[in-house]
Amino acid sequence: MSKNIKLRTENLNFYYSGFHALHGISMDMVEKEVTALIGPSGCGKSTYLRCINRMNDLIPGTRVEGRLLLDDSDIYSSGVDVVDLRKRVGMVFQKPNPFPKTIFENVAYGLRVNGIKDRDFVARRVEEGLKMSALWEEVKDRLHSSALGLSGGQQQRLCIARALAVEPDVLLMDEPASALDPVATQKIEELIFELKKKFTIVIVTHNMQQAARVSDVTAFFYMGELIEIDATDKMFTRPKEKQTEEYITGRFG
Amino acid sequence: MSHTHLSREREQLKMLVLEMMSKTTESVRHSLEAFSEMDTDKAQDVIDADNDINELEVSVDEKCLRLLALEGPVAGDLRFILGCMRVSVDLERIGDEAANIAQDTVVLSLKPGLDFYQRLTVMGYKALDMLKLAGRAFSRENTDEAVQVCKMDNEVDELNSKMIKHVIGYMADHTPAIERAVRCINVARRIERIGDLATNIAENTVFISQGVNIKHYCRFDNR
């Protein structure tokens, strides 16, 4: 059975003013698979991640060359509605960033800014989002309490629920568990296994074991270049490139 | 490439497996010498030495288990640890086979020798050559030498078949020697098994070095 390509990157170059941060990246991401981006700090993996929902557009002086296709449409072509793009490509950050609002309003936020006023519809989506992020059972009796009262792990799952409430196709996760304890980390990882049944997930992580555990495909970046991309089991048992082997076995540099 | 804690641990593991390899190779050599000379003292030494090999297997197991649990090895490190676990199991079995040959020698030494003892010894030294080459291939992580070991196994298998056929024929004409002849068939089978286990070690060397599984069909192509 042929796999459906959700995201295709063709010769992508990215510049921060004069700094050439990504060099000719070309890769495919398959629908409903988890792709892990690994590499040392400054290798360009987060820059690449932020290219996927055009978050880098917010940084002055940046420039993109090449193509990044979401369902065969270039997200950098003129006329693309960036707000609509970010609805289709949700993002979860390293540090949980709930808004100083109630749990309910945090999850409903994306729907509200998209102009949805139907209360039943919003309530249904909030519940679905919280269920998908495996938080519902823990918060269903205090939906109108402040989100800031949740633990770090719960806050991160709340942020995932917030991203899911607008029904994205793709979920970008930038080190989503790096600020969490092992129990909360395990919950996030279990959640990723569940979420990939419905979404295409791209995760940046510095935790090699996490990349090995949760992803189907792993891409290794170094100095702005994509050094190797392959099935995760292959990358972690017999990588093709010496640089990949040295990085994942901790012998880099 | 910088040296990590794991790379130092890996070196220690390799030394442990090489020590086991060396002791096992010595046991096989001594068992063959004991057999060809019907030297019961030497045979007893081989039987006694088996315990050292068993203890080394336990040490390799413990070390591998600890590295897997604590170091989270991947890629070449993971293959090396898995490979060492398999190699140590093969070495322990080779040690058992050497001890079995030594035990057969003790019994055979009580009666006059038969004319095919010499041929059995020749076959034994072929298996010993395989084991030595498998040890060198493992030590150097040398794929070419490992593949050479696999090729040598056919010769030992063939010698074993011929030997068993010959001994069965001999038994038909020499019924008083049946007990000794049956023991010789056992010795031939043990030697053949040592060849098979040396082949396993060689296959694991290819796995460690290249990440390619060549078990059961003994060929190497870098897929």
Image: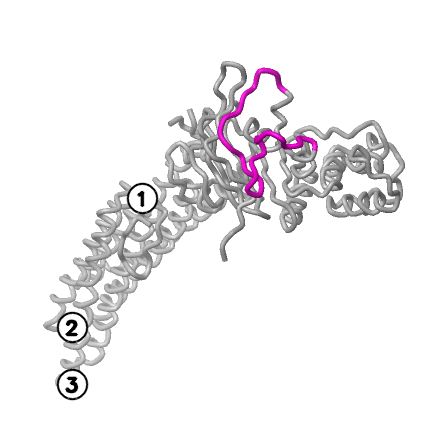
Closer mark to the observer between disc 3 and disc 2: 2
Closer mark to the observer between disc 1 and disc 2: 2
Distance from Cα at disc 3 to Cα at disc 2: 16 Å
Discs 3 and 2 share one subunit: yes
Res. A12 visible in picture: yes
Classify residue A165 as left or right of residue B79: right
Q: Give the answer, above or below, for where A62 lies relative to A130.
A: above
Residue A121 image point, x, y percent: 84, 46
- Residue B18, numbered circle: 1
The question of residue B39 being in magenta is answered with no
Q: Give the answer, above or below, for where A47 lies relative to B94.
A: above
Q: Please give the range of residues in magenta.
A: A59-83
Residue marked by disc 3: B172
- What residue lies at 45% left-to-right and 24% top-to-bottom? A223
Residue A49 image point, x, y percent: 58, 31
- What residue lies at 60% left-to-right and 24% top-to-bottom? A56
Classify residue B34 as left or right of residue A191: left
Q: Secondary structure at mark 1?
A: helix
Mark 3 nearby-residue class (10 Å; few <14, some 14–19, many ≥20)? few
Residue marked by disc 2: B162
**Circle 3: residue type:** Ala
**Circle 2: residue type:** Lys
Q: Secondary structure at mark 3?
A: helix
Q: Give the answer, above or below, for where B10 lies relative to A64.
A: below
In this view, the residue in front, B202 or A122, is A122
Q: Earlier in the sequence, mark 3 or mark 2?
A: 2
- Residue A64, numbered circle: none
